[in-house]
Image (cartoon, grey):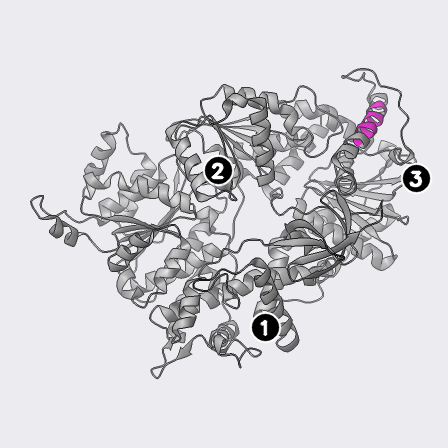
Amino acid sequence: MTDSTAERWMAARGWQPFPFQQQVWQAMAGGRSGLLHATTGAGKTYAVWLGALQHLATPAPAPEASPRARRAAAPPLTVLWITPMRALATDSLRALQEPLPALAPHWTSGLRTGDTASGERAAQDRRLPTVLVTTPESVSLLLARADAHERLSSVQLVVVDEWHELVGNKRGVQVQLALARLSGWNPRLQVWGMSATLGNLPDALATLVPALPPRAPRRARPLLVQGRIDKALQVQVLLPGRVERFAWAGHMGLSLLPQVVQSIESSASTLVFTNTRSQSERWYQALLEARPDWAGTLALHHGSLSGEVRGWVEAGLKQGTLKAVVCTSSLDLGVDFLPVEQVLQIGSAKGVARLVQRAGRSGHAPGRTSSITLVPTHSLELVEAAAARQALAEGRIEDRHTPRAPLDVLVQHLVTIALGGGFVPDALLAEVRRAPAYAQLADNDWQWALQFVRQGGASLANYPDFHRVVPDEDGVWRMPDARLARRHRSNIGTIVSDASMQVQFVSGGRLGSVEESFIARLKPGDVFMFAGRLLALVRTQQMTAYVRTAPKGSAALPRWNGGRMPMSNTLADSMLRQLEQAERGVFASPEMRCAQPLLALQDAWSALPTPGRLVAEVLHTREGWHLYLYPLAGRLVHLGLAGLLAWRASQQVPNTFSIAVNDYGLELLSAKPVDWPALLPHLIGEATHSTVGEGLEGGLEDEVLASLNATEMARRRFREIARIAGLIFQSHPGEQRSSRQLQASSSLYYDVFAQYDPGNLLLAQARAELLVQELDMARLAQTLQRMKSQQLSVHMLERPTPFALPLMVERFRERLSTESLGDRLARMVQALEVAADATMGTARAHGPALPVALEPADTPALARPRRARGQRAAR
């Protein structure tokens, strides 16, 4: 096929190729691999697909040939098109099929995912199509076939769509290992990735394209193509009529419901993104109550819904029959919803890449304007909105990095390759090291993995079920047991869902279920709020948390919701710069001007955090002694940092602390007085080692693990590792296992390894993943280093500041029902507004202050008078 053929096909649709598309075509014609990074909806799919057809399609058989002859002339599997989601796979196949009749009529196409019907699978088992759209898990299943080499060695091109969704997780490592194997079978294999939201593009390219095998022909280096399309991206913000100077997370969102309804009404079709499934349910119901006439044209879409319901919603979006869809990240990726005119984001997107991805769901075509409107759920999200727009204008997007040598994925891959024809260890090691995640794989780790698949390690050697892979008389390692082979094929993959734990009274009576990641952070005796009750954890056993009723007034730990996304580094840095400008009196955006009353009051009563200043606030109330600290490093980092500071403080003076965190800061509340101005510089400046990935002992990680319930957290993390490594199974052929059974099995293995095989590398991996994924230790270490270099500004408060109140509310939520929380906050805010008016010399915008008698617990008792502005304690 010639370039002009593809251009004529585009011209027939009123299109002209963009320069970046032609650049990709030229690179593919020269046999090069690469990564295409371009705006969502700019034409990435056809850049790569038309390049593949021009480069790989052979002449079609004569039109007079019989149907059987034309089918026989169809090329074997030539293109593997890998997508991260099943819904995206279906949509991608539809786009790839469109040019085939005109440009490659003899090519066949097909789809292979977990949803593929058994009849189609059987047909593919006889003959694979020329182009196969599939997922990482299904590629691994193909590699596990005994005839894998015969069926897959014909592949000339692998395309990885939405690479940003895979590069930073174990599914991406699966893809790397598959690419290393395929490139070994075909040294001329081309690999192309596509992405719209990546910051570290050279690293992403190097992670995608495997190192060349020794016998590969010398060719040009992989190419990075950036599509620069004049595609407008509008970021708007729904500004509230009045911004509260004392706001708390979530209180503003539904108050903007009338404006959201008006925005939806003015557009033909809208996606309303939320960050959690519960939030999507709440907004869906609120919109229906506000506009009952939208019933049937308003839909809901998230991962807990059935595939049929999600398919109906996606079809309705494509056909333009739906007015609006309330959704979560389930619609983030590149499914083409051309009729969608606008996107609303409830709350902060918490990251620039996510903002761009969601905005790209509107105007999803070259030249069309993408539009996203942010709906702040509390006043500080106005600052986040301004920060996101600034970061977007500067082109700063978050980086993503591959996991380093996860042994559970390697163990699974070894068994897969043993099924797919077998392997010779030395040759396979060289192949595995071509995958960037394993480029530095140690010889000892490789030998451990081999022994683990051969006999299950030191503690499981006596159990035949763990003798999975054994060398034959020729030295080829194979999997001879058909029963174990069927079990492995049924469990290939690295997706492990978060299980739920039952909450039950010790005396009997179940209260419901909660995410296990929440319970894993609690120790016996810790108090939490659930089902409208204040509960104390007694013990956890298998998948049940046994509790008792806690005394009234007990201090509860902060809630942990795994679905709440922490603020990214990029957004946090931009937010600090916005606050620095505000301190200088520069309010350049409507959002910052709207938030000015809150920021001015924070600066008057305390100070604004900036890149060079770390703000700490100390307050004494009837509850105890409060420390508020604002590193602006995100929820995960603040959780680890709060535990670390509390642990360090208690090592010097025994004390008990309650913790609250949000994306902006943390609160430590103690029953005993603490001289924070004197102690805090030492706690922050204590010498530590950042030992993530370095294997050092006695460093920062050990301190953080000691401050949290790390053993139980690692045990929960081990469940995922054990499933991927093949110790436990989500299902046997013809059987499904419950999450309770999975956790019970993984806990047994954890205990056996800890007692009889403490050097088991899967235990070490569980600890490492806990540090990296759940505690974000690398970012925590960076935050500590930054805090040491900042000026520490300590302020003695008379009352909670606008930044402190949201942290106080985080604790209140655990002890109070929604109604009593609202009443108490209303009284507190009214008293604080009176004090704020006196400070700022302004009249209350919402009317005169009402004379109310505050409860003693609501009125902070002064420990010390506030220092004058020029007397801040500085390090």
Nearest to N terminus: mark 3 or mark 1: 1
Nearest to N terminus: mark 3 or mark 2: 2
Q: Which mark is residue 692?
A: none
Element at label 1: loop
- Please state the horizontal and vertical placement of residue 764, each as a whole percent of the image: 61, 67
Main SS category, magenta section: helix
Q: Which mark is residue 357?
A: 2
Magenta span includes 639: no
Nearest to N terminus: mark 1 or mark 2: 2
Q: Amino acid at mark 2?
A: Gln
Vertical arrangement, residue 839 with respect to residue 546, above or below: above
- Mark 3–mark 1 distance (CA, rounded to whole Å): 52 Å
Instruction: Find the magenta span and give its range.
Output: 825-834
Instruction: State the residue lying farthest toward the bottom.
Output: 473
Vertical arrangement, residue 274 with respect to residue 263, above or below: below
Q: Which mark is residue 760?
A: 1
Q: Quadrant of the C terminus?
A: top right
At a point 86% along the width and 19% down the height, the residue shown is: 850
Q: Nearer the viewer, residue 813 or 107?
A: 813
Q: Which residue is mark 3?
A: 863
